[in-house]
Image (spheres, grey):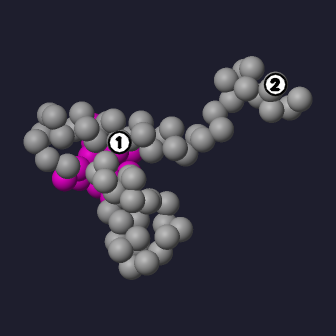
Amino acid sequence: NRIQLLNSVGFEWNFHDDQWYTRYEELVTYVKIFGDARVPKRFTKNPSLGQWVANQRKNHRKYQEGNSSCGIGENRILLL
């Protein structure tokens, strides 16, 4: 079975979810260090985090406008 073979080598089925939670944990660390979640878009110590935060803000705006396919849902909004 192909699925079992992929599982046996540690295949990541929800890669984008894993990436999202990795960035979220980086944001939690940022907040502990800097006291806020206002990560600059061009944050030199972690450029990926700065871009990710900018994307979350953009996705949140889309969600508020009624776009349910924007990549962010109620559960992630509550975390942020």
| Crowding at mark 1 (Cα within 10 Å: few <14, some 14-19, many 20+) | some
Please state the extent of the stretch shown in magenta in the rendering: 38-54
Of the pair 60 and 75, the residue shown nearer to us: 75
The numbered mark, 1 or 2, whose residue comes first in the sequence reads 2
Left or right of 16 in this view: 13: right
Give me the disc on residue 24: 1
Residue 67 position within the rendered picture, expressed as x and y whole percent measured from the top left: 47, 75
Residue 34 position within the rendered picture, expressed as x and y whole percent measured from the top left: 12, 40
Mark 1–mark 2 Cα distance, whole angstroms, equals 30 Å
Count up the numbered dots.
2
- Residue lying furthest bottom: 65
Numbered disc 2: secondary structure: helix
Residue 5 position within the rendered picture, expressed as x and y whole percent measured from the top left: 81, 25
Give me the disc on residue 5: 2
Q: Amino acid at mark 2?
A: Leu
In the rendered image, is residue 66 in sight?
yes
Quadrant of the image containing the N terminus: top right
Numbered disc 1: secondary structure: helix
In the rendered image, is residue 58 in sight?
no
| Crowding at mark 2 (Cα within 10 Å: few <14, some 14-19, many 20+) | few
To which quarter of the image does residue 26 belong? top left
Left or right of 15 in this view: 7: right
Q: Amino acid at mark 1?
A: Tyr
Residue for point 26% across, 46% down: 43
Residue for point 33% across, 36% down: 25
Give me the disc on residue 3: none
Residue for point 80% across, 32% down: 3
Of the pair 5 and 75, the residue shown nearer to us: 75
Residue 68 position within the rendered picture, expressed as x and y whole percent measured from the top left: 49, 70
To which quarter of the image does residue 47 belong? top left
Residue for point 40% across, 65% down: 59
Q: Is residue 53 magenta?
A: yes
